Image (tube, rainbow, N blue to C red):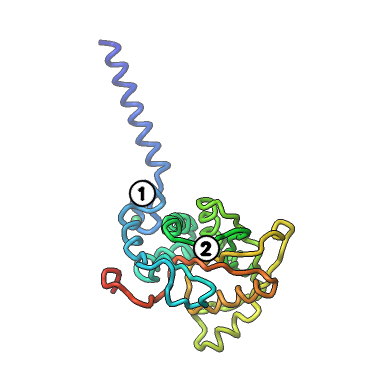
Amino acid sequence: MRWLRSVSQELKLNRLINFVGNSLWQLNCPLCQRPAEGILCKDCDRQIAAHQSPQFLQKDCPISPQIPLYSWSIYDGAVKRAIATCKYENHPEIMEAIAEKVVNRWRQEPIAALKNTVVVPIPLHANKLKSRGFNQAEVLARRFCDLTALPCHPRLLQRVKDTKPQMQTKTKGERQQNLSKAFVVSRSPQDLDSGNVLIVDDIYTTGTTIREAIAAFLAQNITVKGVIVIARPQFESRSPKFNTK
Ligand SMILES: [Zn+2]
């Protein structure tokens, strides 16, 4: 019987070790603070997934017919909260979780040839980067590239003008003035082969930021093959299924 007691004690110990280990290492969901097996809990993950757009390729061509815009979701509800929590409550891992969803969608989409194409996130100005501690678009782009094996060049585009948030501008003219000449392309030796870029950002709002970035690439004879974002505010046609309050 002694061996039985010994095995049972060992099992209890293992259980205790597992319990302590799980309590120490299982992180809570950054959106609801409940325990999560992945980065997000299943409930929050489901709420975010509910905002997925019926169309990944935006058929209204808001940038231009030559530069496709891919938007994974509608900027609303759980997606909006997740992006805000990431940026303003220091949770870059949320971008990694969403990047995986974007990649899953990207893989279903017939895409143009991406030869000599590098992925470039919209950069933050150095001051903003210092205060936030990370660039959410870069976290998104890096994870996107990890999963698609496309090269990520986060330093190719640089933000040289410390602009105010676009949300604080009132008119189209003010938005353009705010971002005018905000970006420059700074090629390093490793960027010399990159003739094409795929731009990645978290949100597409009025498009002014993206247009300024495209202008900076065009000035260097670099072709923008497309733009991928997590969300944009409105879609050309909304299916009632995807409508949100
Ligand atoms: Zn959660």
- Residue 198 locus on image (x, y percent): 56, 64
* Res. 128 visible in picture: no
Please tell me whether mark 2 sits on a helix, a strand or a loop: loop
Residue displayed at 45% across by 65% down: 230
**The N terminus sits in image quarter:** top left
Q: Nearer the viewer, residue 10 or 165?
A: 165
**Which of the image's four quarters has the C terminus?**
bottom left
Foreground mark, 1 or 2? 2
Mark 2: C-beta under 8 Å from nearest atom of ligand 1: no
For residue 151, which quarter of the picture? bottom right
Query: Identity of the amino acid at label 2?
Result: Ala
For the point 39% across and 44% down, the residue is 26
The quadrant where residue 212 appears: bottom right
Instruction: Please name whichever residue, 238 or 87, is drawn nearer the observer in this view of the structure.
Output: 238
Please name the residue that numbered disc 2 is placed on.
112
Q: Position of residue 204 (x, y in %)?
A: 48, 73
- Measured as percent of width and height from the top left, residue 123 is found at 60, 67
Against 169, residue 227 (above or below) is: above
How many residues crowd mark 1 within 10 Å: few (<14), some (14–19), many (20+)?
A: some
Marking on residue 162: none
Where does residue 36 sit, x and y in percent of width and height? 36, 49
Q: Residue at x 38, y 31 (%)?
A: 17
Mark 1, ligand 1, within 8 Å: the answer is yes
Q: Residues within 10 Å of mark 2 (few under 14, many from 20)?
A: few
> Where does ligand 1 appear, by image quarter?
bottom left
Say which element carries label 1.
loop
Q: Which residue is mark 1?
A: 36
Instruction: Determine the CA span between mark 1 and mark 2.
Output: 37 Å
Q: Amino acid at mark 1?
A: Ala
Q: Relative to 26, does residue 125 appear above or below in the rendering?
A: below
